[in-house]
Structures are given as structure tokens and as C-alpha cells.
Image: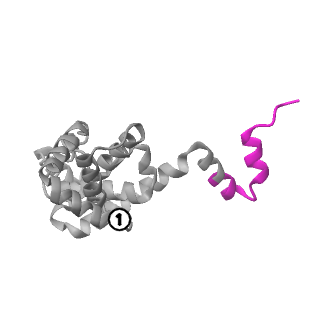
Amino acid sequence: MTPHTTFDTLLEQATGPAEFAAAFMDHLGLAGIFKRMDIAEEEIAAARKRHPDASDQLYHSFLLLVPSHERMEYEPVYRSHCRELLDRVAAGGDPRLGTAAEVCCALHDTSLIAPLRSAASGLYFRMWRAAGLPDFHELIPASEKHEALEGSRIDDHESETRRKLTDPTRTLDSVECRGMHHGERVICTLAPAPTLLDTVNAEAAS
């Protein structure tokens, strides 16, 4: 007798093709991937509205928004990560440096191994607030206390931690637009300058 598989269970429980497809995607972990892709697209669209002068760079920033930690399966963490990177791109900053969300994830992992020291706790509170993660009752008083007592040490910890979390591949340097956005021809600042052959072809097409 053929062993009963997870695939068989999904097939039995599905009430139709759409339900089966959704359950199968969830089983493979694809549902979460597609959800994060949707979030990335939403954040790019919102960033382009906030920063219209950097619209082209932001359009091509999708590949910068790859989740870098398993905690980014939580929507507020991933949205914060995307938002900071996109705002950084718009401002001409360096997207390779760690984000506030990434620092929070790293400190979370560290806290599972050993208690955080005072300045590290202060950094955790600072990055939590910077990331715009959900507030809790003790957050602001505790953060302000740490900032008052050891703000300069927290500054040093922040610079060092962001640097250590640098992702050298997170850059737009290799992006070359083909002059098409969402299937529509556009004039993009990341497209190469047109050549004489391009001009001839365009005139011939018209």
C-alpha cells in the first residue's frame, strides 16, 4: 500500500483548485515569500510617492529588499527594514549598512545567548523606536533613561553594529534599466544613454 503523504492530505482537505494551490504554497513556504514580495512592492510604491525625485532609483530597489533575517517573517519588522533602505536610497545614502530592524534582530539573537549589557539594551531600545516597531509601556521611559546616562556609548555601539551588519551585495551599482517599467516604455535615469543605432531603430519603428 502506498504511504499517505502530505500531498495527499492537502488534496483531501482542499475544497477546490484555488484552496489546494494556497495550501500547497503554504506547505512549501511560498506563501510567505509572495507576501513579502507584495510588501516590498507596496513600500516601493509608497516611497516613490514620498520621494518623486528618486522615483527611478526606488523602482529598481526591489532586489535590495531581500529579507536578511528569519524575524523578517513578521510584517512590521520587514516593512521597517524596507522603508529605511528605500528612504536611504532616495537620500543618496549607502544601502549596504545595517538597518534599525537588522540591529534589532541581531540584538534579539544576542539576548537569547546572554543578558544584554546596559549600553546594548539602550541600543536595542533606540533601534526599536527608530524602526517604528510596536510600542510597549516601558519602552520610552527606559529608552530615555539609557540615552541620558550613556548616549555616547550607544552612539558608538550603533555605528559599530550597523557596520558589522553591512551587506556588500546590497547596492544598485549593477542595475541597468532597459527603459521599461511595468511593461511601459519610460525615460529612466538608470538607463544607458541612447546610441546612434538606438535612434535609427526608433525612427524606423515610428
- Quadrant containing the N terminus in the rendered view: top right
Compared across the picture, whether 47 is left or right of 154 comes to right
Look at the picture and state if 186 lies above or below 94.
below
Disc 1 element: loop
Residue 111 locus on image (x, y percent): 38, 43
Quarter where residue 54 is shown: bottom left
Residue at 23% of width from left, 48% of height from top?
119
Q: Residue furthest right?
A: 1
Q: Is residue 170 visible?
A: yes
Query: Label 1 sits on what residue type?
Result: Glu
Q: How many marks?
A: 1
Q: Nearer the viewer, residue 63 or 119?
A: 119
Indicate left or right for 204 with 107 as reference: left
**Farthest-out residue, top:** 1
- In-image side of 88 versus 101 (left or right): left
| Residues rendered magenta in the picture | 1-22
Residue at image position (29%, 56%) is 125
Magenta region includes residue 199 = no
Q: Position of residue 87 (x, y in %)?
A: 21, 59
Quarter occupied by the C terminus: bottom left
x, y percent for residue 102: 31, 47
Q: Position of residue 6 (x, y in %)?
A: 72, 40
Q: Which residue is mark 1?
A: 138
